Image: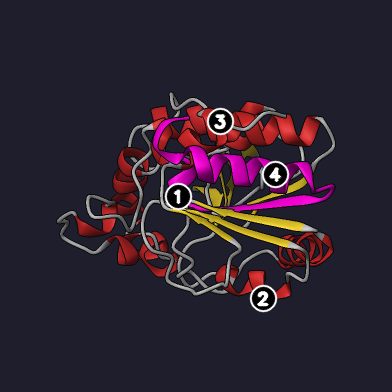
């Protein structure tokens, strides 16, 4: 357990005392799988591009400069060789044993499902679902990644990833399911997120349960009044938990 032994022991006590855990996670959950974080010191937002990442990953940019969008998207947002890390795996174990009832994620990489989690609410969509804008045909991430320039359907239509871009609204059904899961949970674990992206960050206001835990390497923007706060890599912490 090392440096975080006390915190891990406390987290273990909380998990042992819980019967309905919900996990709310962000980019920091995937950084240990070598997927870069958008907002960290060396994240995508700090790198230099002709346009800002916020501009590129917007609906209007996708429409007006589809080729430029895909050049950035395929290079900086699609990591198809990434594998689930200790955090993803432990959450899947907690679900399998009946402790954890939902994973709510701001990530689009599909690693929670790859680790075995079944009830995953993807607030921002997934790189693994892509649809033709003309006929609606489905394409997987591999097809998009390997395509030359703009990925196109057999019908000639432009394929769009099922990810929520800036200027687009979140899926209302996913929002409702996420809020319901949080409101019914006895324990909410928030991991790998700075809680600066709304409306997702506001979801935690619906928590009325017993234990609130935050595990995040950097300071969390929203003061949530957590019972336990651990400033550490989430995979390192979760790997110390016994299910």
How far apart are labels 1 and 2 at the CA level?
20 Å
Q: Residue at x 51, y 43 (%)?
A: 6
Looking at the rendered structure, the secondary structure element under dot 2 is helix
Q: Residue at x 84, y 62 (%)?
A: 184
Label located before the other in sequence (2 or 3)? 2
The residue wearing badge 4 is 13
Q: Is residue 51 above or below residue 192?
A: below
The residue wearing badge 3 is 240
Q: Are marks 4 and 3 in contact (CB under 8 Å)?
A: no
Q: Residue at x 64, y 38 (%)?
A: 138
Q: Position of residue 8 (x, y in %)?
A: 55, 40
Q: Quadrant of the C terminus?
A: top right
Report whether 33 appears left or right of 75. right
The residue wearing badge 1 is 27
The residue wearing badge 2 is 205
Q: Closer to the observer: label 1 or label 4? A: 4
How far apart are labels 4 and 2 at the CA level?
24 Å
């Amino acid at each position: 357990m090392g440096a975080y032994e006390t915190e891990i022991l406390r987290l273990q006590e909380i998990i042992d005392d819980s019967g309905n855990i919900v996990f709310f996670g962000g980019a920091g959950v995937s950084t240990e799988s070598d997927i870069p974080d958008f907002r960290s010191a060396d994240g995508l937002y700090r790198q230099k591009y002709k346009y800002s990442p916020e501009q590129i990953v917007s609906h209007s940019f996708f429409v007006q400069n589809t080729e430029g969008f895909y050049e950035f998207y395929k290079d900086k947002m699609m990591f198809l060789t990434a594998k689930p890390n200790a955090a993803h795996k432990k959450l899947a174990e907690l679900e399998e044993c009946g402790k954890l009832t939902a994973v709510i994620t701001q990530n689009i990489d599909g690693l929670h499902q790859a680790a075995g989690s079944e009830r995953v609410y993807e607030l921002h969509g997934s790189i693994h679902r892509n649809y033709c804008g003309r006929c609606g045909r489905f394409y997987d991430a591999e097809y998009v990644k390997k395509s030359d320039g703009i990925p196109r359907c057999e019908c000639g239509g432009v394929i769009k990833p099922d990810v929520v871009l800036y200027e687009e609204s979140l899926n209302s059904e996913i929002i409702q399911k996420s809020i319901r899961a949080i409101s019914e949970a006895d324990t909410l674990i928030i991991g790998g997120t700075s809680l600066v992206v709304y409306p997702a960050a506001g979801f935690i206001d619906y928590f009325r349960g017993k234990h609130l835990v935050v595990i995040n390497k950097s300071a969390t923007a929203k003061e949530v009044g957590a019972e336990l706060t651990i400033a550490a890599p989430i995979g390192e912490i979760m790997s110390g938990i016994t299910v």
